[in-house]
Image (cartoon, rainbow, N blue to C red):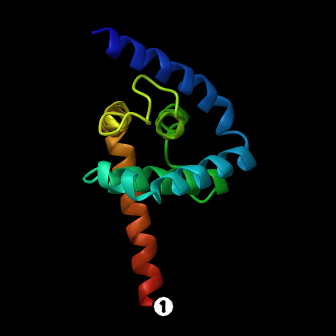
């Protein structure tokens, strides 16, 4: 129970930070790069098997929002997406990432929470992304 409380208290801190971050194109771009770099680590990829696609989709969504290509998502939902990525990026969270095998459990919980909460808007983004790819392929 205490871990759940601690998890969501820290996530709320990330939400506050995300509110300002989504307005700053340079800082949000740096966050996207940092999350991508973290995902390149072999131990992270192994631990996130099954969730890697979801995190990568959230990264693409944040990046497309950042550059202004995709804005068909509520600001509230975008804040949650960025907060989830910030939480994932942070080495200091409910279960520190340096604890082998357990360090990403809370990160997965947060990513799952974000995914479930904004699922419809993520699906719309993925459809937009697919339509964009389909149009490029036909040219």
Residue 39 x/y as whole percent: 46, 55
Q: Is residue 65 visible?
A: no
From this view, report whether residue 135 is shown above or below residue 5: below
From the viewer's perspective, tell me whether residue 121 is left or right of residue 24: left
Q: Is residue 100 visible?
A: yes
Q: Residue furthest bottom?
A: 139
* Image quadrant where residue 98 sits: top left
Q: Residue at x 50, y 38 (%)?
A: 74
- Between residues 17 and 89, which one lies in front from this camera angle? 89
From this view, report whether residue 35 is shown above or below residue 132: above
- Between residues 107 and 18, which one lies in front from this camera angle? 107
Q: Residue at x 71, y 44 (%)?
A: 27
Could you say whether the residue bearing mark 1 is in a helix, strand or loop? Answer: loop
Can you say which quadrant of the picture contains the N terminus?
Answer: top left
Q: Which residue is mark 1?
A: 139
From this view, report whether residue 105 is shown above or below residue 30: above
* Label 1 Cα neighbours within 10 Å, binned few <14 / some 14-19 / many ≥20: few
Residue 54 x/y as whole percent: 35, 51
* Image quadrant where residue 109 sits: top left
Q: Residue at x 49, y 44 (%)?
A: 73
Residue 84 x/y as whole percent: 46, 36
Q: How many badges with numbers are in the image?
A: 1
Q: Residue at x 31, y 55 (%)?
A: 46
Residue 66 x/y as whole percent: 63, 51
Q: Residue furthest top?
A: 2
């Amino acid at each position: 129970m205490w871990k759940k409380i601690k998890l969501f208290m820290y996530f709320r801190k990330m939400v506050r930070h995300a509110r300002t971050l989504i307005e700053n194109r340079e800082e949000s771009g740096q966050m996207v790069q940092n999350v991508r770099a973290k995902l390149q680590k072999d131990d992270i990829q192994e631990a996130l098997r099954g969730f890697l696609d979801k995190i990568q989709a959230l990264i693409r969504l944040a990046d497309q929002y950042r550059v202004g290509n995709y804005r068909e998502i509520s600001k509230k939902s975008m804040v949650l997406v960025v907060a989830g990525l910030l939480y994932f990026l942070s080495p200091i969270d409910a279960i520190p990432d340096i604890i082998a095998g357990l360090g990403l459990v809370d990160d997965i919980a947060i990513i799952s929470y974000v995914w479930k909460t904004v699922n419809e808007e993520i699906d719309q983004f993925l459809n937009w992304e697919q339509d964009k790819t389909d149009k490029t392929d036909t040219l």
